[in-house]
Amino acid sequence: MVCRRPGQLRWWDGRAWTAARIVTGNAVSSGGAQDSGNVDRTWAVLSHLSFFVLPLVAVIVIRLTVGKQAALVRHHSSEALNAQICFGVLWNVFGGIYLAALLTRPQDPPFAVLFTVFILMLLTAAGSTVMSIIGAVQASQGRFWRYPVLWRPVRGAVRP
């Protein structure tokens, strides 16, 4: 189906009208509208980078809005959400162990336990940071990438 307006040409792709194209003579050029693939990639990148700004909240909003329309966004937002959930669980478990070690012996806390748990918390934070950046880079290239996460409570990611 074609929608012709004076100087513009648009196509119906089965879901929505495409971006307006300006017809000048025999040439057709983009009328300054963004490519939907670039917009999808942007949302996919933002779902990974939400780890640094609004963890869980932003990625859930992206998944429930834009993720329903675009497969790339659904995949990356599902993966980012799973990674953020796993990070939150690990961080809270390690924090609970750290706090329990401090509270059980407040005058003489076990240094080995505190140091080990602190290092594990740092490694978890560093690993999540690196994986979020790698995921954002993969999303910017339009690739379907998966976090090396063992637990995926949220479905929606494409399996390799």
Image (cartoon, rainbow, N blue to C red):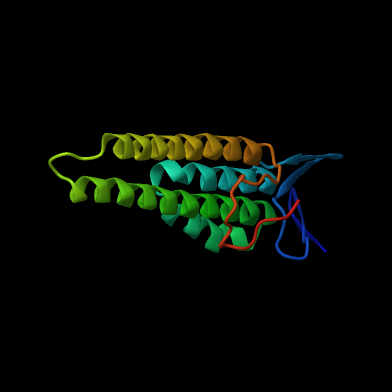
Q: Residue at x 61, y 50 (%)?
A: 76
* Nearer to me, 65 or 18: 65
* Nearer to me, 89 or 156: 89
Of all residues, the one furthest to the left in this rendering is 107
The picture quadrant where one finds residue 122 is top left
Q: Residue at x 16, y 39 (%)?
A: 108
- On the image, the x and y values in percent for residue 81 come to 52, 54
* Nearer to me, 9 or 118: 118
Total numbered labels placed on residues in the image: 0
For residue 36, side relative to residue 46 (left or right): right
For residue 92, side relative to residue 134 (left or right): left
On screen, residue 61 above or below 40 = below
- On the image, the x and y values in percent for residue 149 come to 59, 49
- On the image, the x and y values in percent for residue 103 come to 19, 50
* Nearer to me, 96 or 50: 96
- On the image, the x and y values in percent for residue 27 come to 83, 38
Quadrant placement of the N terminus: bottom right
Q: Residue at x 25, y 39 (%)?
A: 110
For residue 50, side relative to residue 44 (left or right): left
